[in-house]
């Protein structure tokens, strides 16, 4: 008897799940759509936290402008416009509060009378100088970019909160425009303009080397003499008067230039050397300067450059050695 035959994998082809063209189209379509749909959902999930919530103003014009705001800005200040200068509390909030509000890095805390007492005794000028030039761990102006007047306002604000009674310093004076004063000339008394030139024998004007420059009293008198020379006078007289005019002007202006205070002194050194703060000899105090003058300009200049006692190197400035020597020379000459 023959055994019954059992079917196996070799008996013939198997039928797949796709039996019709419609099923093939659907399978192909699903093979593309389902992965793409899954990718879209995944991207939405990942970026969902960066989207503004409902009711948010993240897309408002103000918020957009803040996000695209330039990293740096240029601010032009007019020192003569007091309305554009910051008040003491504004400077404190913008720059000083980082340390003085919490008392960080050894900075005296705002309103702490005990911490401020010893500092207040040094005076407003000394405190302002320390704030402008920097002291200890505090950099100059604490890293800010304000005028010395604005820094002084902030110092007054902080110290008065701790019991001081300082008054705000006087606002900086506006620089007056340069003026030229001339003596009465051909145009009559009070005529403004360029100094008249002296005529020579031929009637053509002789140029005055000081034309257009401000006149001193002596110079104006000499210029008047030159202008009064008759047209047909000896030209030698006019030349002599012009030469005398030049010499008088030089003699008049040279002492003034030699005794004028350098700008560096007015900006930095006067803070201590005018009132005599922290042991600094007052300019004009002959007794205080006598032993120092005996050391010589070079020694005094070296001390100023390196710093001595309570005075930091170069007074806390970044001036050149030549500028420091100029200031030292001025103070010595003014204190002899």
Image (tube, rainbow, N blue to C red):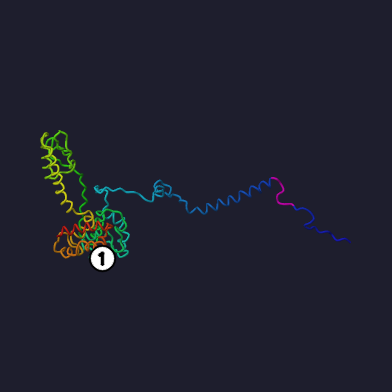
Image coordinates of residue 221 in percent, x first then y, are 10, 42
Image coordinates of residue 255 in percent, x first then y, are 15, 52
Q: Is residue 17 left or right of residue 8?
A: left
Relative to 141, say whether 57 is above or below: above
Which residue corresponds to the image point at 72% horizontal and 52% vertical from the top-left? 16
* Quarter of the figure with residue 312: bottom left
Q: Look at the image and tell me whether residue 132 can be seen.
A: no
Residue range of the region highlighted in magenta in the rendering: 15-21
Relative to 243, say whether 336 is above or below: below
**In magenta stretch: residue 323:** no
Image coordinates of residue 77 in percent, x first then y, are 28, 48
Which residue corresponds to the image point at 43% horizontal and 47% vertical from the top-left? 59
Q: Is residue 40 left or right of residue 207?
A: right
Q: Residues within 10 Å of mark 1 (few under 14, many from 20)?
A: some
- Which is nearer the eye, 86 or 249? 249
Which quadrant holds the C terminus?
Answer: bottom left
Q: Residue furthest right?
A: 1
Image coordinates of residue 191 in percent, x first then y, are 14, 37
- Which is nearer the eye, 127 or 101? 127
Number of marks in the rendered image: 1
- Which is nearer the eye, 239 or 269? 239
Which quadrant holds the N terminus?
Answer: bottom right
**In magenta stretch: residue 20:** yes
Q: Look at the image and tell me whether residue 201 can be seen.
A: yes
Q: Main secondary structure of the magenta part?
A: loop
- Which is nearer the eye, 7 or 280? 280
Tag 1 residue: 115
């Amino acid at each position: 008897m023959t055994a019954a035959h059992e079917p196996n994998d070799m008996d013939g082809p198997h039928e797949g799940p796709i039996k019709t063209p419609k099923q093939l189209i659907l399978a192909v379509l699903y093979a593309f759509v389902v992965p793409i749909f899954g990718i879209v959902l995944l991207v939405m999930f990942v970026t969902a936290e960066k989207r503004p919530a409902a009711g948010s103003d993240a897309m408002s014009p103000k918020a957009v402008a803040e996000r695209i705001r330039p990293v740096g800005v240029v601010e032009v200040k007019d020192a003569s416009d007091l309305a554009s200068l910051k008040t003491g509390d504004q400077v404190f909030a913008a720059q000083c509060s980082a340390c003085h509000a919490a008392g960080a890095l050894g900075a005296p805390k705002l309103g702490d009378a005990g911490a401020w007492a010893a500092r207040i005794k040094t005076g407003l000028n000394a405190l302002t100088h320390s704030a402008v030039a920097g002291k200890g761990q505090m950099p100059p102006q604490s890293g800010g970019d304000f005028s010395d007047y604005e820094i002084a306002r902030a110092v007054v604000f902080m110290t008065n909160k701790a019991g001081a009674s300082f008054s705000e310093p006087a606002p900086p004076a506006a620089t007056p425009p340069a003026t030229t004063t001339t003596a009465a000339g051909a145009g009559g008394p009070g005529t403004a303009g360029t100094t008249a030139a002296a005529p020579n024998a031929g009637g053509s004007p002789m140029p005055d080397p000081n034309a257009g420059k401000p006149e001193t009293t002596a110079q104006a008198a000499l210029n008047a003499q030159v202008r009064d020379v008759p047209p047909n006078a000896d030209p030698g007289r006019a030349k002599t008067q012009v030469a005398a005019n030049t010499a008088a002007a030089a003699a008049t202006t040279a002492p003034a230039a030699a005794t004028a205070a350098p700008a560096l002194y007015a900006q930095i050194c006067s803070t201590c050397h005018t009132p005599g703060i922290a042991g600094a000899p007052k300019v004009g105090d002959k007794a205080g300067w006598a032993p120092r003058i005996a050391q010589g300009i070079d020694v005094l200049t070296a001390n100023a450059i390196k710093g001595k006692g309570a005075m930091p190197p170069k007074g806390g400035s970044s001036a050149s050695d030549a500028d420091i020597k100029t200031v030292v020379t001025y103070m010595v000459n003014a204190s002899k």
